[in-house]
Amino acid sequence: MRFDFLQPDRDPEPPGWESFRRDRDLTAVWSYEVIRASFDGSWARPLLCVAREGERVAGFLGALLLGRGPLLLDVRLPAHSNGPTWCLPDGAEGRAIIRGFERAAAAEFGRRLAGVVYRMVTEPALPLVARRGAVVRRSPGTTRLPVRWTTSDEWIATLSRNRRSTLRRQLKRIAQDRTLRVAEGSARTDLDPAELAELHERHAARVTSRTGPGNPPAGLLTRLLARPAAAFDRRLTLPAAYFAELIRRDDVRTLSYHQDERLLAFAIVYDHPVTPMYGPWAALPADEGGRKDLYFDSYARIIAHAAAGRAGLLFAGRGFVDVKTSLGFEYLPMSLVAVPRWAIG
């Protein structure tokens, strides 16, 4: 098996990438052009590894290359939050690709490679990366909603009495507000990507300041990186180029809320007939003219779309787990797996 390393911010799309993505029925988040756009102007050094059997793409992984002296492969990509940033076969073949990826990385970067960290590893994927010598820690999990209804009203009827009555009041207020302009759809051309990126950055910075950084196994990672663990958790900004690439696509839905010409909030959905994913969300805070009930309205609209399309599961990422579980979402635990140099391959 051959392993090719690519930098999407400078290398062209490799042969077979899009065919593999379509054959595996992956969402737009795995489009090579979307990944490329997500690193526009970024501090991050992205690295994609494509595994091939002959000319056939067998799987791929996405990571960030961290450090200047000692190097760490941090297996994550911007806007991915529902599972690990790889697409691999299950079982022994997937484990073989993981180990081959690690050996190829060790050959590519030599003694500078201090180790590999796998983020957002779901329970079924854990056997692919866990092994003797690896450090496994719980990390924030993701959320998903089994879609068992054909309308959002049917979904609302399954919620607790308090949540049900509150949500119905919120949706009614929004529906009756003539100053509010709500639009949703794919291939949008009426939105300014720079405005979306600015609002998202402000929103993400505000949420991060409240919740703090993640919680990796600090001792091991500090030694691997020879730098403070907080630097390892540096947040990835989503640039205007990313939103420009997304909102123009037929397989991405954008929901927006305006008051006059002012953008109050928006949500991105990576659409899919079976497993759509609620992606980036951003909103003005209430003290700047925003409205708290827009967040809940977005869920009603996105669930309505998923239900109408007969989707099976709606993924909604990490964060605000208490709110999401009150809306019927399930919590899926995930782990972080840190593999030091001596244990890779």
Image: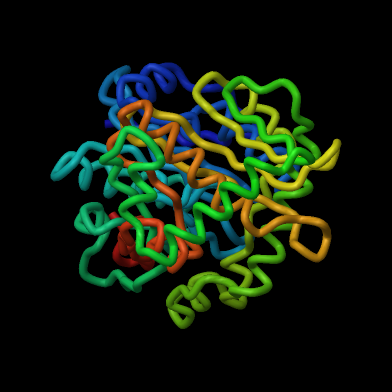
User: Which of 111/65 is in front?
Assistant: 65
Q: In this rendering, is residue 59 above or below 285?
A: above
Q: Residue at x 39, y 46 (%)?
A: 315
Decide if residue 341 is in sight here. Answer: no
Q: Residue at x 63, y 70 (%)?
A: 231
So how many labels did they put on this image?
A: 0
Decide if residue 220 is in sight here. Answer: yes
In this picture, residue 196 sits left or right of residue 139: right
User: Which of 294/341 is in front?
Assistant: 294
> Horizontal and vertical percent for residue 216?
46, 73
Q: Residue at x 70, y 29 (%)?
A: 244
Residue 123's quadrant in the figure? bottom left
Residue 69's quadrant in the figure? bottom right
In this picture, residue 219 sits left or right of residue 257: left
> Horizontal and vertical percent for residue 58?
28, 29
> Horizontal and vertical percent for residue 96?
21, 44
User: Which of 329/89 is in front?
Assistant: 329
In the picture, the quarter occupied by the C terminus is bottom left
Q: In this rendering, is residue 226 above or below 89?
A: below
Q: In this rendering, is residue 312 above or below 337?
A: above
The residue positioned farthest toward the bottom in the image shown: 219
The structure's colour scheme is: rainbow
In the picture, the quarter occupied by the N terminus is top left
The residue positioned farthest toward the right in the image shown: 261
> Horizontal and vertical percent for residue 197?
74, 43
